[in-house]
Amino acid sequence: MAIKKESFGRNPYGEEVDVFTLTNANGLRVRIMTHGATLVSLEVPDRNGKLKDIVLGFETAAEYGPGTPYFGCAVGRFANRIANGRFSLDGKDYQLALNGDGVHALHGGDRGFDKRIWTAEVLEEEKGVRMSYFSPDGEENYPGNLTVTITYTLTDANELKIDYTATTDQATPINLTNHSYFNLAGHDAGAHGAQTMMINADAFVPTDGTGNPLGGFRSVEGTPMDFRTSVAIEQRINDDYDQLQQGSNPGYDHTYCLNKKKAGELSFAARAEDPDSGRVMEVYTTEPGVQFYAGNFLDGTSKGKDGCHYAWRGGFCLETQHYPDSPNRPQFPNTILHPGETFRSQTVHKFSSN
Ligand code: BGC
């Protein structure tokens, strides 16, 4: 496998961006840029071997700026919401930017990890690219100097592996994910509703209309949130169910609590399939949750790759992560990283066709 490095122009902050292309023995091709350690494209074959780019994104690095939908990027220091942007740690109160609908902290703040330049290292032997980022103490008001690495590896078994590590010199909240929007029929194929979804979770985190957890968990049993067997995404997304009928852009936008035998094990999280092309994506993760977001905020205004405009619900995200607002919820799995510890997490996307 060859790993190609090219210039990808400048980001919205005027910084130079490189893009790396990984190709495996079966022709799968993924491009990752240093701005936001972002997955720019991911070409995957259908049942006839026809490659299509199945992730939403922009043509140039310059378009990945503030106010865009977090296409393909790494999200941190804390993915998802922290209620009212507030948390306390070791007796100190912290106030973060309220960049999520003006009420909560969202996805690491005004200029989170998705809008930073990462340092890339090609791993010839492992067939991957390691992206590193140093987030100084106080950046976006988070405590502690944090060093993060994200390693993308493309295997000949058609797996894209994403490995995360982080270390800190002060206790800090951490929640890292990748924010790719998938459309298994092709990034420009329009609404994804006929594609099927399966999520290995008996419960989810119910939220209010601003995405803030109500407290506790809710069983999926007997609700349109139940994806324990494959079902078309569109089948129940508009059902008259409280969790699907709230906020400015209703639909699935929830963290599922993944069924695991042991916390931290790499286990099956989700499976999506496009019945037309036959493309299948399975997701495995060590994380306790996955945010299934159906692209409810996409509205046709984002002009993406190949000049297409991304339709409402034209891409879905399966963001493997911890639960929202964990720093304020002692009953949720821990998200505080301490000095001397190494945060580790892995997510694997496996592609095949039917
Ligand atoms: C959130 C959505 C949000 C989207 C883009 C997702 O992770 O759950 O509510 O609109 O990211 O910011």
Image (spheres, rainbow, N blue to C red):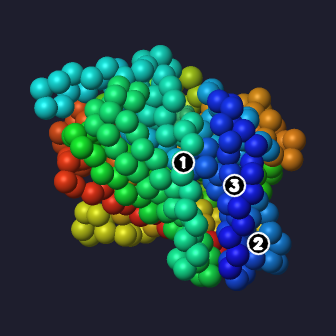
Determine whether the beta carbon of the residue marked 1 sits less than 8 angstroms from the nearest atom of ligand 1: no
Mark 1 secondary-structure assignment: loop
- Checking the image for residue 19, the label placed there is 3
| Cα gap from disc 1 to disc 2, whole angstroms | 32 Å
Residue 308 shows in the view: yes
Please state which of the two labelled residues, at mark 1 or mark 2, is closer to the viewer: 1
Label 1 packing within 10 angstroms: few (<14), some (14-19), many (20+):
many
- The quarter holding residue 158 reads bottom right
Label 2 packing within 10 angstroms: few (<14), some (14-19), many (20+):
many
Picture residue at 56% right of the left edge, 57% below the top: 120
Q: Is residue 258 above or below residue 246?
A: below
Q: Is 265 on the left or on the right of 79, as rendered?
A: left
Q: Position of residue 272 (x, y in %)?
A: 59, 62
Q: Circle 2 is placed at which residue position?
A: 46
The amino acid at mark 1 is Trp
Nearest the viewer among 79 and 221 is: 79
Q: Position of residue 353 (x, y in %)?
A: 69, 75
Nearest the viewer among 110 and 10 is: 10
Picture residue at 72% right of the left edge, 66% below the top: 4
Q: Circle 1 is placed at which residue position?
A: 118
